[in-house]
Image (cartoon, helix red, strand yellow):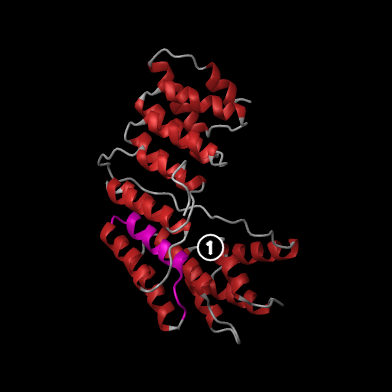
Amino acid sequence: MPSPAPHGRALSTLRFRRLKKRSSPFPKKLFTKPPLPEYMRATIHKISTTLRYSTWDAAATELRALPLHWDSFTVNRILKTHPPMEKAWLFFHWAARLPGFKHDRFTYTTMLDIFGEAGRIPSMWHVFREMEDKGVTPDAATYTSVMHWLSAAGDLQGAVRAWEEMRERGCRPTLVSYTAFMKILFDHGRPKEAAGVYTEMLEVGLSPNCHTYTVLMEYLAGAGKFKAALKIMSEMQEAGIEPDKAACNILIQKCSKAGETSAMRQVLLYMKEHSIVLRRTVFMEALEALKLVNGSDHLLREGYYR
């Protein structure tokens, strides 16, 4: 179990307030996969382009002619290029009929994500149940995707049931799962439950990563607790984790909406020291916020145009 500091202090900064529902970005990946060989990148790009711009019949003819070993890694990479949903589904079933090929939890989860992102929740459940019928056991990543897309569709109770089902089936939540469920609860105005999930995450020996800290800071800043959010920002650095571009942009955007120029300046100073640049849309929001209070935009412009 990690020591109470600094992770425990992050929890103590939460003062609970109900929030309006808002959409969530998909949880970040924890690990970076090794790059594909150049010829495989070119092949996957070619197949993705074919699926995107050809009719299915023409695409299937080209696919059959490729001198390619069709394994789940290759199929999953193609699905992750996000071809049109209908083509992705046809390709998914085409691959299932290849001699010796069998979909695994990676390809099923990616197909499930494609339907979830499109808001096709019944189709997402169809893929999930087919996965089980084929004897492929859903893992934590699969359940995390299900939770996320149910939440994005406004079905908090469904997301909670997915979380409970995952645990009942002996599937241990990962750091990504805990962080995603925390964000779901925060986004649906359940900060006390989110704090409980955070406590449990620490108790099972998982330490927060940058995305976990970002979720905490986003909630606190959204609740107007900028001092607490900046405290988390400091504590994560004490833990050896530097706020990234996404975290900084989120904080600056929250500061802009609240007119919180003092906290904005502290985040901008950090960004300047670490060569982090704002997205243009966030820069424009911050610029407008500073104009409203007749604040200096020198630091803002210096960082953006660096």
Q: Secondary structure at mark 1?
A: loop
In this view of the protein, which residue sits in the foreground, 112 or 50? 112
Instruction: Look at the magenta stretch and give its main secondary structure.
Output: helix
The residue sitting at 63% across, 70% down in the picture is: 74
Q: In terms of depth relative to the viewer, which is nearer, 212 or 72?
A: 212
Q: Tell me residue 257's x, y (percent).
A: 37, 29
At horizontal 56% and vertical 39% (from top left) the residue drawn is 242
Count the marks.
1
Q: Is residue 120 visible?
A: yes
User: Picture coordinates of residue 52 (x, y %)?
Assistant: 55, 63
> Does residue 110 sit above or below 195 in this rendering?
below
Q: Which residue is mark 1?
A: 83
Seen at 35% across and 63% down, the residue is 163
Whether residue 196 appears in magenta in the rendering, the answer is: no
Of residues 236 and 58, which is closer to you in this image? 236
The answer to which image quadrant residue 278 occupies is: top right
Magenta segment: does it hold 150?
A: yes
User: What crowding class fits label 1: few (fewer than 14 Cα within 10 Å), some (14-19), or many (20 or more)?
Assistant: many
Residue at horizontal 40 percent and vertical 62 percent from the top: 116
| Quarter of image, res 144 | bottom left
Q: Amino acid at mark 1?
A: Pro
> Which residues make up the magenta segment?
136-155
Q: Is residue 243 visible?
A: no
Image quarter hosting the C terminus = top right
Looking at this view, name the residue that lies furthest to the bottom: 99
